[in-house]
Amino acid sequence: MKVNGETLVKGVLTAVAFSALASLLLIAVFIFKEGFPFMLKVGFSDFLFSSTWNPQVGQFGIFPMIVASLYVTFGAMLIGAPLGVAGAIFLNEFVPRPVMRVIKPTIELLAGIPSVVFGFLGVMVLAPFIREHMGGPGLSVLAASVILGIMVLPTVISISTDAISAVPNSYREGAFALGATRWQSVHMVILKAARSGIIASIILAMGRSLGETMAVIMVAGNTVRVPHAVTDPVRTLTANIALEMANATGMAREALFATGVVLFVVIMILNGIAMSAMKGRGKK
Amino acid sequence: MRSVSVQVGCAGLLAGIVLLAGCGKSREGITLAGSTAFQPFAEKLAEQYMATHSEVSITIQGGGSALGIQSALSGAAQVGMADLVKLPKEADALKSIVVARDGIAVVLNPANAVAGLTLEQVRGIFSGTIKNWKEVGGADHAIAVISREAGSGTRSSFEQIIGGITLTGDALIQDSNGTIRETVANDANAVGYLSHGLVNEKIKPVTVDGFSCAEKDIKSGDYKLVRPVFLVYKADASPACKAFLDYLLTAEAQELLHKNGLIQAK
């Protein structure tokens, strides 16, 4: 009886574990099945590198959206990565443990705020501010980058904190013994030792901001045009899918799946990089 | 002993759930899906209808006019709501009624001095040939054009009525009437368009060719930006569904629509 119970549990858990894998596989197959033939039909270079998106009359160029996704993600990293890594260093090296134990969960609480709330703040506070002080319509690359930069902070901080606290204390002691100040020990020893973990946190944050949809739809303005300034409105790949999904039929619907294929490939590449960065950390 | 009582409890709970589900079944479900512009009105009508007809349960879903027609075709919803100038070809297989008419208001921020535009100017603004408010009698500020997403029923009606324009590439895109309203309310130089029943005090509708987007001018046909609201359904729809559609054309329902800002079908 007991042996049967064991095998049963093992079987159930195996099935559960593989169901996650299976759903990933199904999603991939489905998106590619719907999107890939469309890309062949329209032509890869027309689809990826033409700038006119007008699905009603058969123009499907997603180049402005690829550029927009990359700009917004890059902008978010410019804001989120330095703030996040600096925060993680501060929490680990400059703050007494008990204080850190209060601050860290508070920051992680930020991850629980729904993206629509961030978007709402962006529309109500950030966009009018940008419009008044920097011109343009307010809903822009800059607004989206700032909102996403804040949204990824918990990811960057908590993973970087883990990486930094995993650095053996003997490293710090060694640095101090050689006469290093606290800041010297941080940037000469600890950051180098925790580098792969910090890079992984940033790449995970990139994936998060590339995939974020709701907040971006609300603050980016959704204009299909290659931006020339940070105050220009843009439409990201995810926003394009979410905006037009409800009303799309026929070719326009296939075009959205093809947009999904592009997004899927970009995110897979980023995750691949993240994984290899993590592996580098494991080796040490 | 304890495990037995737990089992009995579970069985009881299960029976309760089944019973509840059973009760739910005895009310006939009708689902309407489609136009987000008509959705709030459909909700009000459904509420009123269910107050006197407890035997049906009506669910209203948004999703857009195209989705409304698709859902009616696929059977995902019994009734599709579509506010288009004219129904597309694939809707030929469905029966349709016009339940109301809906004006499309061109709206500005209340801070904007411009009170009226000609149809020509509206066309110029949305196609991008007019870029500054001073060209149409306003202050010297760039116009921020706000439009709906491609495929929206409101957008396709709007573009058809003002004369087959290609929307300017500078336009900001918002995905519902509500977000259009918020964006225009927040930006002093914005211009957008939305279903006139959803205009509120935070935004300002302008006259087009001198006629206001109000009932009088819509009924007389002087205000040009008007489209019908179609409800499409399969010919073999359930009697309860047909009864609800009949109710929508009664004086009582039409009056309710009218009170909330739509124009009666006839």
Image (spheres, grey):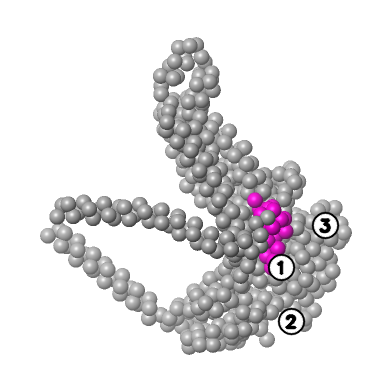
Q: As shown in the figure, which amino acid type bears the numbered disc 2? A: Lys
Q: Is residue A1 left or right of residue A19?
A: left
Name the residue nearer the viewer: B247 or A217: A217
- The N terminus of chain A lies in quadrant: bottom left
Would you name the residue on which mark 1 appears?
Answer: A57
Work out whether disc 1 and disc 2 sit on a shared chain.
no
**Chain where mark 3 sits:** B
Residue in view at x 55 percent, y 79 percent: B73
How far, Cα to Cα, is label 1 from label 3? 25 Å
Whole-percent x and y of residue B239? 48, 88
Residue at left offset 84%, top offset 56%: B132
Compared with A214, B37 (above or below) is below
Residue indicated by mark 3: B131
Q: Tell me the residue that label 2 is attached to.
A: B219
Which of discs 2 and 3 lies nearer the camera? The answer is: 3
Element at badge 3? Answer: loop
- The stretch in magenta equals A46-66
Q: Determine whether A234 is above or below B235 in the image.
A: above
